[in-house]
Image (tube, rainbow, N blue to C red):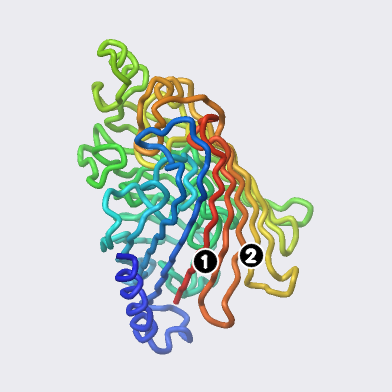
Amino acid sequence: MIKRSFIISILLYPLVVLAQPAGDSLNADQRFNFHFQNTIISQYHPPFNAKYTGKNSLIPTSEEPISVSTTLFMGMKLWNGASVFFNPELTCGKGFSQSTGVAGFPNGEVYRVDNPAPRAYIARLLLEQIIPLSSEKTAVDDDANQLKGERPLSYISISMGKFSVLDYFDLNSFSHDPRTQFYNWALMGVGAWDYPANTRGYTYGVTTQLVKLSWALRFAVVMVSETANGHVMDRDILKARSHALEFEHKYKLFGQEGNVKLIAFYTLARMGNYNEAIAWGLKKNAPPSVDSVNRRGNTKYGLGLNIEHNLGKSIGFFLRAGWNDGQNETWAFTEIDRSFSTGVVLNGSLWKRSEDRLGVAFLVNGISKFHRDYLKKGGYGFIIGDGNLNYSSEKITEIYYSFRLGGYPLWISPDYQFILDPAYNMDRGPVHALGVRIHAVM
């Protein structure tokens, strides 16, 4: 299974190189482009102590899963200010214990899928229109889902189609992409944001941005899935949808650039309520189940904070914090209702390897009282559930080193994560997760 997907990825790599349009790198405006990425992550955790194990627990015996993802990024200019982007993607493999047992899961490249066999699908298909608000422009490089050319310093953009909400919201230069930075799910974004997506992390909708020189405002309305962690999106947008609003401000402090983002989110979906599930369990003399209560369309709302700041030419600092109301079940991302993460990333220029990166991060996750009571009584979500709970916040430390292999577009990144109280349970762990990532781009 893994071997087959890896062979397909290797075969696609030279095709992308040959498909690069000749001379585009010399043109001011690129008409179309092709890019490619392939990421392989192999992880291992040794046996750890566990007083008990439920159906959504991290398996206490040793595991050695592998995940593979391959993506083609195709872009084409349509008319002035308009572009279309198409990303077919192939993934296979799995994470620890079928990607269960830790809220801040240690591999952001895997998903909660039942079948780890190779699967091809459309990750993104979107139309982007930019409306200039100023005559001043800045250069934009050729990159994945970005055509080389010029962009106004001040503009409005409208993007519609299929995409990931994290393509536009909660961006952070030092902690956002598990293919090149930290591995952990809860370091991709604000952990407490149950951001709307299907099982593989994508959704359909519209994002609008107002971008000025020192600030930006973003708003999105997107679809949610019919079921928790589901493949199929709910088409009844009057009863199921999600909204996100973000304000970004760029600043300078002590001569160094920084960026702060404030995020608000609101989701309406067919979620089960934790208190109602507990009441149902007491009535039936059984463990509570959110699948057994009235899914009349409940809500989840919350706030997020995202800060990044340069501490010098070669050191970056980041901090995120988040909160959601935690009354209803997790629907799309992961089971975190309170989150805090911080860390630093060092550029390899400090030791004369300018393309290397060394990152260290620490994160703390928590859940609401409604959520913890539900798990304590034997309830299950789609990510965690040990059949019991001796509650504590989940604490994770991660360190990675990324280095480029010679002059090739290939990066190798060993990684270590120390996970204390996985899935908020002091009766299990700690867990040591070791990994190595191979990331190729074109």
114 above or below 193? below
Residue on which disc 2 sits: 357
Sequence-wise, which precedes: disc 1 or disc 2? 1
Q: Residue 409: percent from the left, percent from the top?
A: 51, 77
Tell me the quarter of the picture where residue 138 sits: bottom right
- Tell me which residue sits at (53%, 31%) in the image: 366
Q: Considering the image in quadrants, where does the N terminus appear?
A: bottom left
Quadrant of the image for the C terminus? Answer: bottom left
3D distance between C-alphas at marks 1 and 2? 37 Å
SS of the residue under disc 1? loop
Q: In x, y percent, where is residue 132? A: 45, 61
Which residue occupies 53% across, 44% down? 247
**Quarter of the view holding residue 109:** bottom left
Q: Residues within 10 Å of mark 2 (few under 14, many from 20)?
A: many
Q: Position of residue 23 (x, y in %)?
A: 43, 89
10 Å crowding of disc 1: few (<14), some (14-19), many (20+): few
| Residue 322, above or below 417 | above
- Left or right side of 408 for 91: left
Amino acid on which disc 2 is placed? Arg
Q: Describe the element under mark 2 as helix, strand or loop.
A: strand
**13 vs 424, nearest the viewer:** 424
Residue position marked by numbered label 1 in the rendering = 135
Amino acid residing under circle 1: Ser
Q: Are marks 1 and 2 in contact (CB under 8 Å)?
A: no
